[in-house]
Every structure is written in C-alpha cells, then in structure tokens.
Image (tube, rainbow, N blue to C red):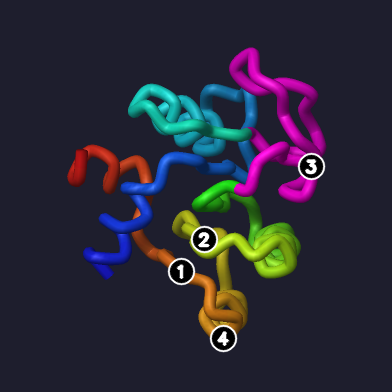
Amino acid sequence: MDELIKSMLSKKAWAVVGATDNPEKFGNKIYKKLKRFGYEVYAVNPMYQTVDGDVCYPNLAEVPVKVDCVDVVVAPDRANDALSDVISLGIENIWFQPGTFTPDIIDRAETAGVKTVYLNCVLVELDRHK
C-alpha cells in the first residue's frame, strides 16, 4: 500500500469530492492542504459555488480537466456515486478517506481496475511523504 500511496501523491491534478468552506470539516482541511503542498486541486460539491475562493464543481464530470486522482471526503452513499463518475471518466486513482467507504465500494473500485487507497488519511500521508 505504501508504494501506491507514494504513486498517488506524485500525481499533480486532484479533485476533492466533498470539498467545503467549513474550516471544521475534513473536506476543507484536505482541499487547503493539497493546495498548500502545490497540487492543482479542484473542489467538487453540489452544495457550493466556491471553496476557498476557487470554483466548486457540482460533480466530477464538470471539472474542466481529467484529474489524476480523486480524494473522497463524503459519506459512503455519495462516495459510491463519485466512484461511478471515476469509472465512467476513466480516472485511474481514487483515495477514500477513513469513514467514506464500505467493503462493497472498495471491491467495486478494485474490480473496475481503479487504483484504490483507503484506511489512510491524505492529511497524514502528505506529511509523511513530502
């Protein structure tokens, strides 16, 4: 798993599904930290027009570029929808934050050939690997 984490963290264009302007939420902390670490980051959340002053897209299909990695920071039912978008858009990497997935979601991602990280928090791993 460590090699997969390093590989994903080497990717430069990320989308954060569940990005938010609420500084108490992980969707905000992850979005801002990825930006601070120099990533090209796209906010995805149908509830917001902007996040941290940036355009926020209602879904992955609306993001203007094909991202390298999607970080999922939403409940499993919405995570499953995000996974459907990842598969249909041909995005190769997905990172499920703790609490955002079920075993069925992980099985579905891996069966579809999507490189999948789960159980690890991107906030922790950024500090470990950068």
Asked which secondary structure carries label 3, the reply is helix
Q: Are marks 4 and 1 in contact (CB under 8 Å)?
A: no
Which disc, if any, is residue 116? 1
Residue furthest out toward the front: 65
Mark sitting earlier along the chain (4/1) = 4
Q: Which residue is mark 2?
A: 94
- Give the number of the mark in front: 3 or 1: 3
Q: CA distance from mark 2 to mark 1?
A: 5 Å
How crowded pointer 1 is (Cα within 10 Å; few <14, some 14-19, many 20+) is rated as many
Q: Is residue 96 above or below residue 68?
A: below
Asked which secondary structure carries label 4, the reply is helix
Q: Is residue 116 left or right of residue 43?
A: left
Residue plotted at (50% across, 52% down): 69
Mark sitting earlier along the chain (3/1) = 3
- Tell me how many marks there are: 4
Q: Which residue is mark 3?
A: 62
Q: CA distance from mark 3 to mark 1?
A: 22 Å
Q: Can you give x and y, in whole percent of width and height, for residue 38 in the image?
A: 37, 27
Q: Are marks 2 and 1 in contact (CB under 8 Å)?
A: yes
Residue plotted at (31% across, 65% down): 4
Mark sitting earlier along the chain (4/2) = 2
